[in-house]
Amino acid sequence: MAGSGGVGGGAGGVQGAGAGPGAALRAPRVPLLLAALVLGAYCLCTLPSRCPPAARAPVPAPARAESLRAVGSPGAPGLPVASGPGRRRFPQALIVGVKKGGTRALLEFLRLHPDVRALGSEPHFFDRCYERGLAWYRSLMPRTLDGQITMEKTPSYFVTREAPGRIHGMSPDTKLIVVVRNPVTRAISDYAQTLSKTPGLPSFRALAFRHGLGPVDTAWSAVRIGLYAQHLDNWLRFFPLSRFLFVSGERLVSDPAGEVGRVQDFLGLKRVVTDKHFYFNATKGFPCLKKAQGSSNPRCLGKSKGRPHPQVPAAVVQRLRDFYRPFNRKFYQMTGQDFGWD
């Protein structure tokens, strides 16, 4: 379980407390219980949300079956589609990662485009809800007209071993977008999010390393997610590199119009979302939309975005930079992009 290595190590140091035989048996109980409670709360906060409810029953009543048209979709032939304005389709493009990289911002920016229809929530179909079936998954999607693109985002797909094969089974032509960010900054942001929900969490240093500043604990999800090269290796077993677009989380902040322009090109869309749609919010340190979708008012992302990061000792940050450097360089070689993290 993510984070268990750091918390377990802290609990282990309680052994030997107490003076006599009875105290030796009783003393560890309270700190061990506290550690267990903190770990349990942390694990609950890091779990993805539950499977969302379907927008409609995926299989219509038999009496109406003859009035439905079947859609030819690789890996799922003959699934019914109800008549009406537009159709619910499988996503042609997915934002598959990474957590705390800027995926929500990218999705909100893309939703300004009239030819993009995106599911607002994260369905977690290819990692947590796969047993519900493709018909259920498609029932979640917004209706689209011909020429529009259906999208969804679930950042945990990128680090889920089964996700690439499952997505390939839906359609080998799916376009895959990965928003990446300096893995050290990303890990601290990940920790800050969890800390806001679990105030009693051990320190970042205690979770990131074993035995003080010993080996980096790659069992902790906040560290493991940043091993981008390893995760990409798994995806390249199913998809060629040409199906991917790697978006810089840093440039999404410094030049949102430029990065969103690259995404629009990748999706085969006209560049409708441009610099005229953005302004920089100095308070949040993040670009905001001058005009949000369906509104005439400016809009920034929620208060959970751009939250302050906890202070992490410089030695801890440097150790993590050194740890990630070879993985970053391999990732640069694999993608043909230098993200400038080193």
Image (cartoon, rainbow, N blue to C red):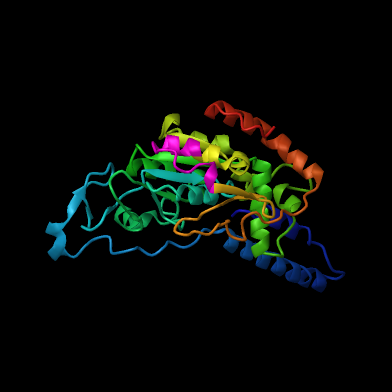
Q: Is residue 78 visible?
A: no
The C terminus lies in quadrant: top right
Q: State the image coordinates of residue 268 (x, y, percent, origin top left).
A: 38, 36
Q: Is residue 134 visible?
A: yes
Name, please, the residue furthest toward the right. 19
From the viewer's perspective, is 281 left or right of 19? Answer: left
Q: Quick one: 93 or 199, which is closer to the camera? A: 93
From the viewer's perspective, is 6 left or right of 95? Answer: right
Q: Quick one: 103 or 287, which is closer to the camera? A: 287
Q: Quick one: 310 or 259, which is closer to the camera? A: 259
- Depicted 3 relative to depicted 185: above or below: below
Q: Residue at x 80, y 47 (%)?
A: 313
Tell me, yes or no, whether the highlighted magenta stretch contains residue 264: yes
Q: State the image coordinates of residue 99 (x, y, percent, origin top left).
A: 56, 49
Q: State the image coordinates of residue 6 (x, y, percent, origin top left).
A: 70, 53
- Depicted 228 relative to depicted 203: above or below: above
Q: State the image coordinates of residue 219 (x, y, percent, origin top left).
A: 62, 47
Q: Residue at x 56, y 47 (%)?
A: 278
Q: Residue at x 63, y 41 (%)?
A: 254
Q: Quick one: 117 or 128, which is closer to the camera? A: 117
Quarter holding residue 216: top right
- Depicted 164 relative to depicted 338: above or below: below
Quarter holding residue 237: top left
Tell me, yes or no, whether the highlighted magenta stretch contains residue 275: yes
Quarter holding residue 284: bottom right
Which segment did they paint magenta? 261-277
From the viewer's perspective, is 31 left or right of 268? Answer: right
From the viewer's perspective, is 341 left or right of 212? Answer: left
The N terminus lies in quadrant: bottom right
Q: Residue at x 71, y 68 (%)?
A: 34
